[in-house]
Amino acid sequence: MIDKQLVAWGSSGNIIREIAEYGAEQAKKGETVYNFTIGSPSIDPPGIVRETMERYLNAVPAAKLFTYAPAAGYPAVREKIAGYLTKTHGVDYRAQDVLVTCGTSTCLAVLTRVLLSGGGRAMAFAPYFMDYKYYAEAVGSSLIECPTEAGTFRLDLAAAERALAPDVQMLVVNTPNNPSGVVFSRESLTGLAALLERKQREYAHPIYLVADGPYRELVYDGLESVFLPELYKNTIDCYSFSKGMSLPGERVGFMALRADMDGHDDLLAACMGVIRAFGYICVSSMWQQVAADCLGATSDVGVYRANRDLLYGALTEMGYACVHPDGAFYLFLKTPEPDAQAFCRRAMRENLLIVPGDAFGTPGYVRVAYCVDRGTIEGSLPTWEALAREYGLK
């Protein structure tokens, strides 16, 4: 028999992609569409990426360049990543602490299966990326949704302490945050690390902090993006080159375990077991090498900052209530009616495509991905203003 839960997930689809596909169909009809749904970078990768790719294509024989890579990634790639993390963040890593993956999604799916298959639950701060919940449910577990501060979405340590039940095995932290754009402060994250240390002693088992960090270079206004393994030894750093390096379609990332974390060897071996058993193997031979040779290079995040300033300034002037995004490339807007899905449907009739916050565990908000060309933002403003007048915001 086919698992009915899998059928339900597959039938329900992904609301972000469903709305985006609607927009694509409207565009085919010649309609002007303002699509703010998918967090896919609109700016080019840094020039060194193309130069490195061309060097590999021209200098390495195809039989070697396009062959299967080792399941854990090329040793030289793992060595470069470990060296970069050590030098950049001051936390010691070795090549054997790093696994090359198909982006952070693979990291999260693998770690959820490793840490929750034997029982226990995951926890995340709302709003959160919707797939966290599916990863937990796929292994027969569940996700505890911990609220953040109302209206600001900053960490609420008192709420975190209440939510950290004895069966929590992993806590996923995403900063800069998708969908809110909030960057958690060093002070709050230090407090969270202290809380986890205390709860580990109280519950007599490790609580692993999974740092979902693909946006960590996308921070504005001089704010700090804290490297979580620096604060808490039982942290697994998960990273993707999709956002900061503008390589979403190449599906390259990694997970890195601190050498001194509890259960390091068994955890690493279990991750490799899941990678093999579920087919998460052999990340693109060329692209993992290209990415490793370009470590530290980022796209021009100033473009996103300018987009943020334009959109945030215009929408707040129109009367919308928005959380000020300090990082990533999303704006989280409080809807002018309680039902965010109804507001999205109303906007969709004007070909303004946004995503309801219900999908991120936070009803009453919508996510607006401003990683688009400036013309899309400028062209959408009259529609935003018309909706603001309709709802009595102006």
Image (tube, rainbow, N blue to C red):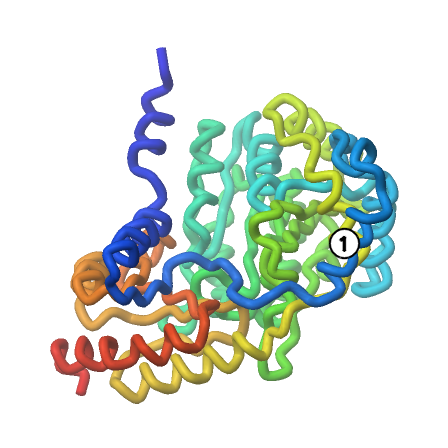
Label 1 sits on residue: 54
Q: Which of 104 and 24 lies nearest the eye of the viewer? A: 24
Residue type at numbered disc 1: Glu
Q: Residue at x 29, y 71 (%)?
A: 334
Can you say which quadrant of the picture contains the C terminus? bottom left
Q: Which of 304 and 126 lies nearest the eye of the viewer? A: 304
Percent position of residue 324, x then y: 44, 78
- When asked about the image quadrant of residue 241, the answer is bottom right
Residue 196 visible in rendering: no
- Left or right of residue 173, residue 146 in this image: left
Q: Residue at x 26, y 86 (%)?
A: 318
Can you say which quadrant of the picture contains the N terminus? top left
Percent position of residue 290, x then y: 76, 51
Percent position of residue 389, x then y: 15, 82
Residue 65 visible in rendering: yes
Percent position of residue 373, x then y: 45, 72
Q: Residue at x 48, y 60 (%)?
A: 178
* Above or below for 66 versus 53: above
Q: Which of 371 and 32 lies nearest the eye of the viewer? A: 32
* Above or below for 321 versus 136: below
- Left or right of residue 386, residue 356 in this image: right
Categorize mark 1 by other alpha carbons within 10 Å: few (<14), some (14-19), many (20+).
few
- When asked about the image quadrant of residue 63, the answer is top right
User: Judging from the image, what secondary structure is the residue with disc 1 in?
Assistant: helix
Q: How many marks?
A: 1
Q: Residue at x 53, y 41 (%)?
A: 168
- Left or right of residue 271, residue 88 in this image: right
